[in-house]
Amino acid sequence: MEPPQGGSSGLRPADGAPQGHSRDPNGPDLFTDGFLTRAVSPPAPRYVWLMNAADTISVITEVIGWFALAAGLTCLLLALLIRVADGRWLRTEAVVIDGDGGSIVRWFTDDGFQSRALSPDERAHVTNPDEEPAFYKEREPYRLRLHEPPTGRRVIRILGLVFIGIAVASAVVGIVLMFVG
């Protein structure tokens, strides 16, 4: 039998026993070698992560590009759903005829002449009875608006196109930086 080595108990770790780090909250990083503990400097990192400006810009433009692409496709899909639900409104000139029974509006479509009665509220908003700008629904030409359709769909579509443009621009910047950087 060999004489004891190491700590006071005479025990030592077996060959190939794991050795590890422990952290003393009040002191330096400690390396445990079996039962003996000694202070050593922390191990040097194996890999140094350095990013130059081109890499940083490339990562930022890629993130912006993905978010812009997602937002643009969402806006365009929403505009398409609104268009499908509401339909297309075409511009026409309407003529308002005042009579004893009330006011009637007449307009021309691809299907011919159309007409309907005006409510007193609608008649109050008519400024030029001889040539009133109006909008009729393409699928249902008997439906008429005396005011312009809401611009929400157009705003959403333009916003979607702007986001898609940002995504394309960021992709171009990323490709240029890939070859330059």
Image (cartoon, rainbow, N blue to C red):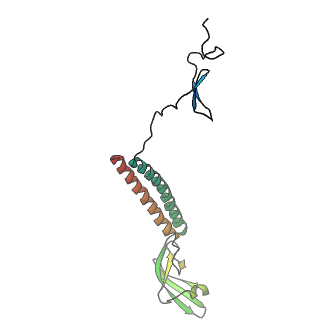
Q: Is residue 29 left or right of residue 53?
A: right
Which residue ends up furthest to the right in the rendered image? 9
Which residue ends up furthest to the top in the rendered image? 1
Which residue ends up furthest to the bottom in the rendered image? 100
Quadrant where the N terminus lies? top right
Which residue ends up furthest to the left in the rendered image? 180
Classify residue 167 by image quadrant. bottom left
Q: Is residue 103 left or right of residue 93?
A: right
When the figure is inspected, residue 157 is found, relative to residue 98, above or below; the finding is above
When the figure is inspected, residue 86 is found, relative to residue 33, above or below; the finding is below
Tally the numbered discs: 0
Instruction: Give the residue drawn at x 43%, y 53%.
Output: 61
Classify residue 169 by image quadrant. bottom left
Res 119 seen here: no
x and y, in percent, of residue 53 in the image: 40, 49
Instruction: Give the residue drawn at x 57%, y 89%.
Output: 103
x and y, in percent, of residue 109 in the image: 47, 79
When the figure is inspected, residue 172 is found, relative to residue 78, above or below; the finding is above
Instruction: Give the residue drawn at x 51%, y 68%.
Output: 153
Residue nearest the observer in this picture, 46 or 171: 46
Res 151 seen here: yes
x and y, in percent, of residue 74 in the image: 51, 59
Residue nearest the observer in this picture, 51 or 129: 51
